[in-house]
Image (spheres, coloured by chain):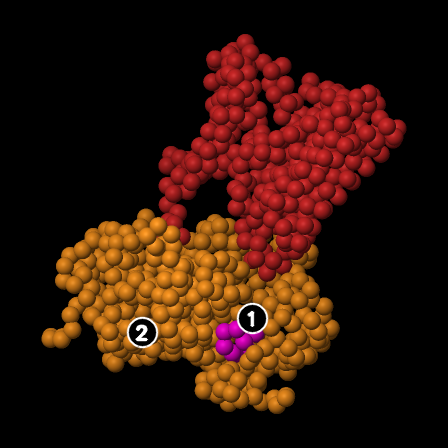
Chain colours: A orange, B red
Amino acid sequence: MTDPRRIKLETRGISKSFPGVKALQNVDFGLMEGEVHVLCGENGAGKSTLMHILSGNLQPGAGSIFLDGEKTIIETPRKALEKGIAIVYQERSLTEELSVAENIFANRQPTNKMGFIAFRQMNKRALELLNTLSLKSISPVTKIKYLSAAQKQMIEIAKALSTQPSILILDEPTASITETETQLLFNIIRRLRSEGVSVIYISHRMKEIFEIGDCITVLKDGQVQGTFPVADMSEDLLIKKMTGRHLSTHVTSTKAQQSIALEIKKLSGNGFSDVSFQLYKGEILALAGLVGAGRTEIARALFGADPVYKGDYFISKQPASINHPGDAIKKGVVYIPEERKDKGLFMQMTMEENILSGSIGIRDRQRVHPGNKRSAATDMIRRLNISPPLPDRKVIALSGGNQQKTVLAKWLLLNPQIIIADEPTHGIDVGAKFEIYQILQTLAKNGVSILLISSELPEILTLAHRILVIYNGKITAALRREDATEEKIMRYASGIENMYIDL
Amino acid sequence: MKKYLSIAGRSLNDRVYSLLLTIVVVSVVASFMWPALFPTFDNLSQVLLNMSVQAIVAVGMMLLMVAGAFDLSVGSVVAFIGGLAAHLMFYNQVPFIVAIAIALLAALIIGLINGLLVAKAGINPLIQTLAMMGIVRGLALMISGAGIEGLPDGFNAIGQSEFLGLQTPVWYMLAIVIIFHLLFGNTVFFRRYYYIGNNEKAAELTGIRVKRMKIYGFMLSALLAGIAGILLVSRLGAAMSTSGQGMELNVITAVILGGASLSGGQGKIVGALLGTLFMALVGNIMIIARVSGYWQQIILGVILILAVLADVLMQKRTGRIPKKFKL
């Protein structure tokens, strides 16, 4: 096989074990110069471990790394940077109170002869960098805290690029950014590729993998399943490689019932206004829209987590006054929040304590009797297939999918009538994702109403009976699934079209 | 055998057990070194009596620290509430029961103000309770000045009687610790504090009224400090405006030794008792050993660092992989 390009980075026989787990076994991975190499696999497959080894956070237990054909040891993240390897982590590394420029050049601020920071020079360099990234709307002197989540993500990338790396590792870079910014990011990646920079791109999103990738390496249980050119791959095959199973998406087939579970009329609150809709019993109703359109704000207001300014709220046709999540829970309305680690879970507490937490805030006859606590928790763990099935295990030790199932378990214990699920499959692996789809579909079949917020259109088109599109805090379209397509939703979501002419 | 070892290992990881073991070891060693002075009923009951006021305050502090907050004003509250009760009895001839009721109500109001300003207005608990510490100390000086003596016999009897050979403050202390320990372990109301301390946002979205619970926490902490203050005045038969000075830091030290964490979500009420007992024993032994009082402070500081360090090392050893490298 002759390849005109050079191999930039290669690992041979990398293994790494943690107590009780073989995180990586004999991993061979090759990265060409100027290619976008997608790394995929379920959570726990070893992607992060491999990434941490390449970036100097971890040392391999066995095997070696070759950079430009030479055997090398990457001792620390600093050494990795010196060798031209930059990484953008999923977790934010920005300091909110400092400026964009100071964040980009964190700990590498240019100084003058006296050893003081040369702010003017630093800002100028930051501005140049932002311009090359087409981020012209961001000023280098703005404090990070005034930026949107998507802009922060772009600054993370700018920070990595400011070191002029020859290898850029991106870990789920599009998790918190919108479609427009994703395209902007892809343009940057394409430009870097043409300049000979190699990119390792970690993502769960099928669409992106096929759009931006040159080749794909699949990891499963710490072992490489193979490296394939993107052109030879299909979505089905990729899922099969990742999970070892053949997963087919079953589109929700049940019909919603005729009775109304929840109705809101002209509801206005922080970030949305005049929102009216009905949610039927047994219906999965999706709220589609761009990040920041106001979907989460609507969900939080319905749950009583944020105030409602005006409007009417009916549950099972009864007017409801909901001023606190406790009120909502009592009425059978529960909320699965967007950032589960930050808002949904008590990470240092056990699975059992988390599962039983649902009723702790309310006075309720449904509360689990103390004597039945253990069995109630283990029942839920079995029902939702949470692994490992150990109620005393701290939630922090679970994978993302199992953490999300723990959040679900906590609410299902209360037999809710209405579930508001905000990005329920965000950042979890394909296997767990389909399990959560099945759980939601079963619940709907049993008469539970679900309000689903999702930024993944395929997810919405699989699960929802009806779709409400939100743009700028208002509903711009109500579509039946049969009538909806991704393009159609995007047109309403970006405000190009509006079903309700209200001028 | 292996099973028992692992149970023992896990128990030692729980601060209540490791601290209890330390207390036993220290006591046994001290008993052998000073058999005539340390292991006597008189000495030990005196240790318990001296720690009783502080232990009651520590119960409230433990509660707040489980919830992820703390209260620096407790030492001042001890002085002010005791002084207020004494003032009402001495200058206004108020019956002692009524004086106690009014004083405890004042304690609840102080707690309410702390709670409202921290939970509702969002002032950092350090700053809010630091300010309150100064304000209440000022009130204490104003109300009891150079001290108030000559309190009614009925009032003095509260803290100066004996029951089953022990001074009554010891019994009050034990009662309060046991009641709160049981409540904390077994009622939904108090379990909420663990959830709040662990993740405030998630607690709110789980339906817990976090702000309200925090206000209750500050009120309970102030109430317990008030009870401690009244008990102290009754025991001494006099109110002094300087009592309880520096107590807040001793109490926080005891509570952290007893298993609380500054980040919240951890700790048991009985740990507050054990932490206070441990500090009292160390103090007592040093007096017996004729070590200077300065050394006492130094040694307690070192012990605090060692205890927290042991926790950090223990967590690393038990294989909790740092979050960053989690698989």
User: Closer to the observer: label 1 or label 2?
Assistant: 2
Q: Secondary structure at mark 2?
A: helix
List the residue tagged with mark 1.
Answer: A296
Q: Quadrant of residue A86?
A: bottom left
Nearest the viewer among A493 and A95 is A95
Q: Residues within 10 Å of mark 1 (few under 14, many from 20)?
A: many
Q: Gap between marks 1 and 2, in whole Å? A: 30 Å
Name the residue: 63% across, 41% down.
B130
Specify the subunit that label 2 lies on: A
Name the residue: 56% across, 74% down.
A295
Q: Position of residue B261 (x, y in %)?
A: 52, 42
Question: Which residues, given as a range, are shown in magenta?
Answer: A286-294
Q: Position of residue A175 (x, y in %)?
A: 42, 69
* Residue farthest along the right direction in this orientation: B93
In what quadrant of the picture does the C terminus of chain A appear? bottom right
Q: Position of residue B138 (x, y in %)?
A: 72, 35
Nearest the viewer among A240 and A133 is A133
List the residue tagged with mark 2.
Answer: A189
Specify the subunit that label 1 lies on: A
* Residue farthest along the top direction in this orientation: B36
* Residue farthest along the front direction in this orientation: A113
Q: Amino acid at mark 2?
A: Ile
